């Protein structure tokens, strides 16, 4: 019974996706809408194949900007969260700003960054850093604060140093929340890089997207979008994989729960 | 027996607007088992936090081996009502944690902990995560961790409170056996009169909050004890006395 259900869980969305693609294709096939407005999937795939080399080169640049900015954001956001958690005084001074800064639409800073830093990689990486930084910092802080107080008391009663408290209890306890932040900012990172490239530059998916748009090659615009989506999914999957590797105790507990469910 | 391990003198502790511990004194001798019995919410856990050095009392002192240890952590080990095992560490690492914290190198710490796994009924579960163990086993692992931190004085705060009646009895029997082999003085919190009598040499009864000591009762039952003590005349008379003491308030 269960097995059939789980196959169905995968089959049903796949079927719905197929129906959607066929209908989309039909719109182009019967010429209900012109291809320069809505190219059918077959044309998009063709564009993907034809431009594979170009897409790969531009995609590589975007991915590099995103990865660099994301890594810097992870390290600095994680460290800032640790510092703020450790020092209540600094936290009380800074936390309100952290929260309100999240309401600033960072992409609106992109033109400003271009003015300041030109059209090289730097402004793109900076946007990625800013976009990723806050979700990581805030979710890490929440994770660090969520630790059972009695667990900390136990560590204290055993004479643990502050560093030992972090290493043994606080940091592992913050991991689920930290990874939740990583997943959010991981998907933002590609988007941030693309938006940064829209402002101008010589390489990257955003730059390429503007170029093909100017030549009204809608199918190629779509092929860029597909690549962006695929990249974002790949980043998400990579983070999920790291999450599993980092927290083996979670999957063990979950697996056991699942087994108990089946046995009932 | 005879040598005093732990002495608590006239402790007093008020939380803001909440007089909690009014006046508690008690003595724990070497290899003695003393239970602290009291109604729920009377300040038993607070008393233990003070002894463990986590909380500073408003008045009074905590002496260990004759030396003042008031508001100093790291001397006695403290087992909470919850097992508080770290979900992200294996049972072996959880039990060896106090040794890691003291700076014992990892391999040696694990070996030391491993040496007690048979006695604590944890054989074969070294590399399991806490979530994979039953409540009774988790409690035994927490006890082993407590023991490895400080082997001479253990504070146990309702260690069996969360277990079902059958597991609880099995754990009490097991604890009695293990204690014969360990060289430890133990202070146990409980609000179960039978548990207190079966396990203890002496029982300290606390009043409602703000807590004062209402009476100290010696348990004149020979060891080794068994669960069939329940019908013993001496058992019944001690139990009567304690229940009387708990009732008058
Ligand atoms: N940090 C605290 N601040 C203020 N009040 C507290 C604090 N800790 C405990 N209390 C209060 O002090 C009283 C005694 O608490 P304590 O946990 O010591 O009781 P207990 O005898 O262990 O109770 P139980 O049998 O439920 O475990 C309770 O009313 C509790 O609400
Ligand atoms: Mg309590």
Image (tube, coloured by chain):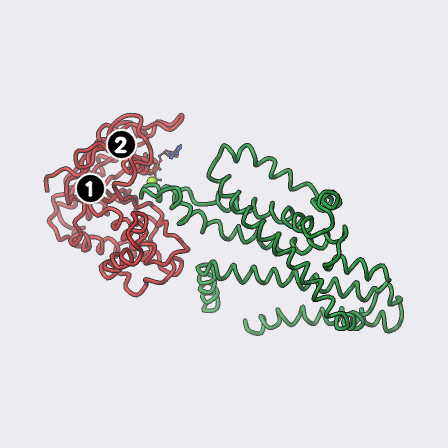
Chain colours: A green, B red
Q: Specify few, some or many for label 1: CA neighbours under 10 Å numbering under 14, 14-19, or 20 or more.
A: many
Residue B167 point in image, percent of width and height? 30, 56
Choose between B2 and A70: the one closer to the eye: A70
The residue tagged 2 is B70
Residue B104 point in image, percent of width and height? 28, 51
- Left or right: B88, with A34 as reference point: left
Tell me the subunit letter for badge 2: B
Sooner in the amino-acid sequence: mark 2 or mark 1: 1
All told, the count of numbered labels is 2
- Left or right: A165, with B141 as reference point: right
Quadrant (top left, top right, bottom left, bottom right) of the N terminus of chain B: top left
Q: Specify few, some or many for label 2: CA neighbours under 10 Å numbering under 14, 14-19, or 20 or more.
A: many
Residue B124 point in image, percent of width and height? 30, 65
| Dot in front, 2 or 1 | 2
- Left or right: B37, with A226 as reference point: left
Quadrant (top left, top right, bottom left, bottom right) of the C terminus of chain B: top left
Q: Secondary structure at mark 2?
A: loop
Q: Is residue B64 above or below residue B196?
A: above
């Amino acid at each position: 019974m269960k097995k059939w259900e789980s196959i169905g869980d995968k089959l049903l969305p796949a079927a719905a996706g197929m129906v959607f693609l066929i209908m989309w294709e039909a719109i182009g096939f019967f010429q209900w809408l012109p291809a320069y407005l809505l190219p059918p999937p077959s044309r998009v795939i063709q564009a993907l194949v034809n431009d594979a080399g170009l897409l790969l080169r531009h995609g590589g640049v975007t991915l590099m900007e995103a990865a660099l900015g994301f890594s810097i954001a992870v390290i600095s956001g994680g460290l800032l969260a640790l510092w703020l958690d450790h020092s209540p005084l600094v936290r009380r001074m800074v936390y309100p700003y952290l929260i309100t800064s999240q309401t600033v639409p960072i992409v609106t800073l992109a033109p400003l960054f271009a003015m300041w830093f030109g059209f090289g990689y730097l402004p793109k990486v900076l946007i990625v850093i800013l976009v990723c930084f806050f979700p990581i910092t805030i979710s890490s802080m929440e994770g660090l604060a969520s630790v059972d107080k009695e667990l900390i008391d136990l560590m204290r009663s055993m004479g643990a140093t502050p560093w030992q408290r972090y290493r043994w209890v606080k940091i592992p306890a913050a991991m689920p929340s930290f990874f939740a932040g990583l997943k959010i900012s991981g998907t933002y990172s590609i988007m941030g890089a693309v938006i940064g490239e829209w402002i101008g530059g010589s390489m990257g998916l955003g730059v390429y997207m503007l170029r093909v748009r100017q030549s009204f090659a809608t199918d190629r615009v779509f092929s860029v979008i597909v690549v962006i989506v695929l990249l974002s999914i790949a980043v998400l999957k990579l983070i999920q994989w790291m999450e599993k590797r980092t927290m083996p105790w979670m999957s063990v507990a979950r697996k056991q729960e699942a087994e108990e469910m089946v046995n009932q | 027996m005879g040598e005093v391990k732990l002495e608590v003198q006239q402790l007093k502790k008020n939380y803001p607007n909440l007089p909690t511990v009014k006046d508690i004194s008690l003595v724990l001798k070497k290899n003695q088992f003393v239970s602290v019995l009291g109604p729920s919410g009377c300040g038993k856990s607070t008393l233990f936090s003070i002894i463990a050095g986590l909380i500073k009392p408003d008045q009074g002192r905590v002496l260990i081996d004759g030396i003042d240890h008031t508001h100093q952590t790291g001397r006695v080990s403290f087992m909470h009502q919850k097992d508080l095992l770290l979900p992200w560490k294996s049972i072996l690492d959880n039990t060896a944690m106090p040794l890691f914290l003291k700076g014992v190198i990892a391999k040696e710490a694990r070996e030391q902990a491993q040496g007690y796994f048979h006695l604590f009924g944890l054989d074969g579960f070294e590399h399991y995560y806490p979530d994979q163990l039953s409540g009774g086993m988790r409690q035994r692992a927490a006890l082993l961790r407590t023991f490895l931190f400080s082997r001479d004085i253990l504070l146990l705060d309702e260690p069996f409170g969360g277990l079902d009646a059958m597991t609880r009895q099995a754990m009490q029997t097991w604890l009695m056996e293990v204690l014969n082999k360990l060289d430890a003085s133990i202070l146990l919190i409980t609000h179960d009169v039978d548990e207190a009598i079966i396990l203890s040499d002496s029982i300290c009864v606390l009043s409602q909050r703000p807590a004062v000591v209402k009476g100290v009762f010696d348990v004149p039952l020979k060891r080794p004890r068994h669960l069939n003590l329940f019908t013993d005349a001496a058992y019944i008379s001690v139990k009567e006395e304690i229940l009387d003491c708990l009732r008058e308030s």
